Image (cartoon, grey):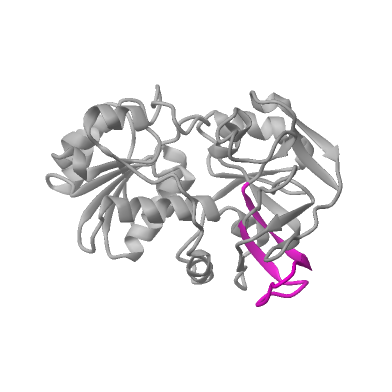
Amino acid sequence: MKALQFDRFGSPDVIVLRDVAKPEPGPGQIRIAVRACGLTPGDWAVVDGLLADQLPPLPRGLGIEVAGTVDALGEGVDGVEVGDRVFGPAAFDGPTGGAAEYALMAVWAHIPVGVTAEQAAALPMAAETAWHALDDLGVRQGELLLVHGAGSTVGEVAVRFALHRGVRVIATAGPRRAAALEKIGAQVTGYGDGMAERVTALAGGRVDRALDTAPTGGRIDRVHQAGPGGGSLPSLIELTGDPDRVLTISDFAAAAELGARITRIEMRFDRMGEFARLAGEGILAVSVARTYALGEIHEAARLSKSGRPGGKLLLVP
């Protein structure tokens, strides 16, 4: 089968497309024929050496989010059959990941009727991150939440989840994403000079809590530089009046300096069934910007790392 791998750590330029053996599912695992694989900033961090001592030795694959058709079942697997459509995180216990023609999974959910494989593959990481971020921030029904960087995939999902929980949402986003966010029920304003004043006017005063989901250009531990996220945490703290009411999913250095919260990095994927249900009901969705063939990984990486992909980027084997 065709699969993306890398033999050394570095930039996405080290990723190559190879012919490799098809992986065999172990106990509790399934194998799927991959129809779509979502790309995330975490992929580039892993290629750069993040979690190097916790993942299999090199060569290693990439691609965390996958959707496809069940191709084989490992020992002890029930509740799913060959031919079923499923989505979730790819298993990383071998030299390949989700960016391949076939992938292994240990956690999955059935793709709801009416949801495409591409739409499903866009969901796991954004849904998992946004759900835990709202919980960690302590967002409550009836509160006013500011989602900064709501044009990102995590930001869009956070807006959707918050609205579903009965929370009023003000979102900051660029002009390309503003109309879509307004359509689902958020009040939207742009980035840049005067943002705090515009948010205050929309809120009629302070906001209750603020969630920073602005992109970091592919490094999940990097302080926001110029662009939508640059200098955001001081403004968010000013808007809430309390650093404990502000949470960031990526700007950890600034959060430590200013006393703001950070969200958990751990990905348990224990709510995949609930995410599937919400996707089937049209509550959970991520806008897909572009799809690429496996051999176009370097082009996809450049757009992803720009911090402005305009939506989810997917590999389609």
Nearest the viewer among 287 and 109 is 109
Q: Is residue 73 visible?
A: yes
Nearest the viewer among 254 and 169 is 254
Q: Is residue 186 visible?
A: no
Q: Is residue 82 magenta?
A: yes
Q: Is residue 68 magenta?
A: yes
Q: Is residue 232 above or below residue 29?
A: above
Q: Is residue 316 left or right of residue 87?
A: right
Nearest the viewer among 206 and 84 is 84
Q: Which residue is found at the position 65% from the left and 77% from the top?
A: 79
Residue 190 horizontal/vertical position (percent): 33, 36
Q: Residue 251: name its quadrant.
A: top left
Q: Extreme bottom residue here?
A: 79
Residue 98 horizontal/vertical position (percent): 69, 49
Nearest the viewer among 210 and 103 is 103
Q: Which residue is found at the position 74% from the left and 70% from the top?
A: 75
Q: Is residue 272 left or right of residue 191?
A: right
Q: Residue 147: name its quadrant.
A: top left
Q: Is residue 260 above or below residue 155?
A: above
Residue 35 horizontal/vertical position (percent): 73, 56
Q: How many marks?
A: 0
Q: Which residue is found at the position 35% from the left and 26% from the top?
A: 230
Residue 114 horizontal/vertical position (percent): 61, 70
What range of the chain is rendered magenta? 64-88
Q: Is residue 68 left or right of residue 246?
A: right
